[in-house]
Image: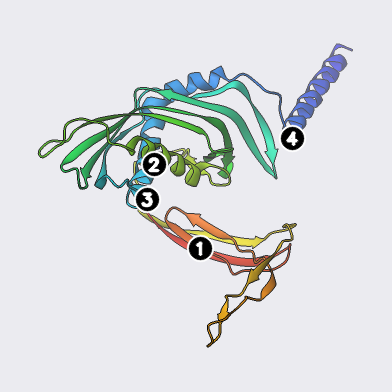
């Protein structure tokens, strides 16, 4: 009798565990949960693991964007130091939850980073009428938005992105830059330019649908990949809005000097997909209709 009751009890517990596991795997969303534990974990792993990796990733991104963007007062600018500091962001201040996006599990949580310990220093060569060099230092930052985390590759990496463009504020200090320097003074427009540069960099790299990847390798070989090939296949799209636009052909001028108005033509919108990875871009051919199909594959060569 006792053995029979024990077996029934074990069977009930096993069924309850299976049911809870099934619900956990199939429910589209989970209740909002506090995540102080996650912030405690982040404080422990930030200084020696996450901060160096993220600083290196964002430093290379900023250096690439500096080549094409600079204010008129600056003739040349280079990044000399990049450190996110020892203060990590605060995650999920209002709680966190899992939700399903398509067939992918996504963690949704708030992101609030207010740090006065970061140090990003630029050396700028000034353009005319100013002459000499100046140091520009970002010494504080405030970024606030909604973060999405998606585990991929069986837990070996995490995709992270902002749901929409976050709020960005920075503190900027100016100083002299060695020989032939100008006195430490504020350079007009530079602070606004840096905020715009940072906001655009975030928008072009980690605001949906663009995502960054944080790898979690089981073994750190202390080696850096110097290159690779990323294969991207664009298959199709569906249920696109049907829009047509009217394009007017250019005015025709006769030999008498009179101008004939252009002829309006109705043309259907052409759809294409552009794939952007770092500085590389690839574009499909254009297709008409609400359900275009491409089946185009791009092999994009990446360099470390």
- The residue beneath circle 1 is 282
Decide: marks 3, 4 in contact (CB < 8 A)?
Answer: no
Q: Which of marks 3 and 2 is nearer the N terminus?
A: 2
Decide: marks 2, 1 in contact (CB < 8 A)?
Answer: no
Element at label 3:
loop
- The residue beneath circle 2 is 57
The image shows residue 250 at horizontal and vertical percentages of 57, 75
The CA span between labels 1 and 3 is 23 Å
Q: Quadrant of the N terminus?
A: top right
- The residue beneath circle 3 is 225
Q: Which of marks 2 and 1 is nearer the N terminus?
A: 2
Q: What residue is at 82 percent from the left and 15 percent from the top?
A: 6
The CA span between labels 3 and 4 is 37 Å
Please say if 79 is above or below 44: below
Q: Earlier in the sequence, mark 1 or mark 4?
A: 4
Q: Earlier in the sequence, mark 3 or mark 4?
A: 4
The CA span between labels 2 and 1 is 23 Å
The CA span between labels 2 and 4 is 33 Å
Q: Nearer the viewer, residue 260 or 36?
A: 260
- The residue beneath circle 4 is 28
Closest to the camera, between mark 2 and mark 1, is 1
Closest to the camera, between mark 3 and mark 4, is 4
Around disc 3, counting alpha carbons within 10 Å, would you say few (fewer than 14), some (14 to 19), or many (20 or more)?
Answer: few
């Amino acid at each position: 009798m006792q053995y029979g009751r024990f077996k029934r009890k074990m069977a009930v517990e096993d069924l309850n565990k299976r049911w809870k596991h099934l619900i956990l795997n199939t429910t589209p969303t989970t209740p909002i949960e506090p995540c102080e534990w996650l912030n405690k974990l982040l404080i422990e792993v930030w200084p020696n693991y996450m901060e160096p990796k993220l600083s290196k990733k964002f430093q290379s991104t900023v250096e690439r964007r500096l080549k094409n963007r600079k204010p008129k007062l600056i003739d040349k600018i280079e990044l000399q130091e990049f450190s996110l500091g020892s203060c990590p962001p605060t995650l999920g201040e209002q709680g966190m939850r899992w939700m399903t996006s398509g067939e992918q599990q996504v963690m949704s949580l708030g992101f609030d980073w207010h740090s006065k310990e970061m140090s990003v220093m630029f050396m700028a060569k000034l353009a005319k009428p100013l002459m000499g060099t100046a140091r520009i230092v970002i010494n504080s930052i405030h970024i606030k938005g909604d973060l999405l985390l998606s585990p991929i590759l069986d837990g070996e990496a995490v995709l992270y992105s902002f749901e929409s463009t976050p709020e960005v504020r920075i503190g900027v200090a100016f100083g002299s830059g060695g020989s032939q320097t100008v006195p430490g003074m504020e350079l007009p427009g530079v602070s606004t330019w840096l905020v715009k540069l940072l906001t655009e960099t975030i928008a072009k790299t980690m605001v949906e649908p663009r995502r960054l990847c944080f790898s979690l390798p089981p073994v750190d070989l202390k080696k850096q990949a110097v290159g690779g090939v990323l294969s991207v296949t664009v298959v199709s799209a569906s249920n696109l809005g049907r829009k047509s636009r009217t394009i007017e052909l250019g005015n025709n001028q006769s030999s008498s000097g009179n101008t004939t108005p252009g002829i309006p033509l109705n043309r259907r919108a052409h759809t294409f997909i552009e794939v952007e990875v770092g500085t590389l871009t690839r574009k499909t051919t254009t297709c008409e209709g609400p359900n275009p199909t491409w089946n185009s594959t791009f092999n994009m060569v990446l360099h470390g």
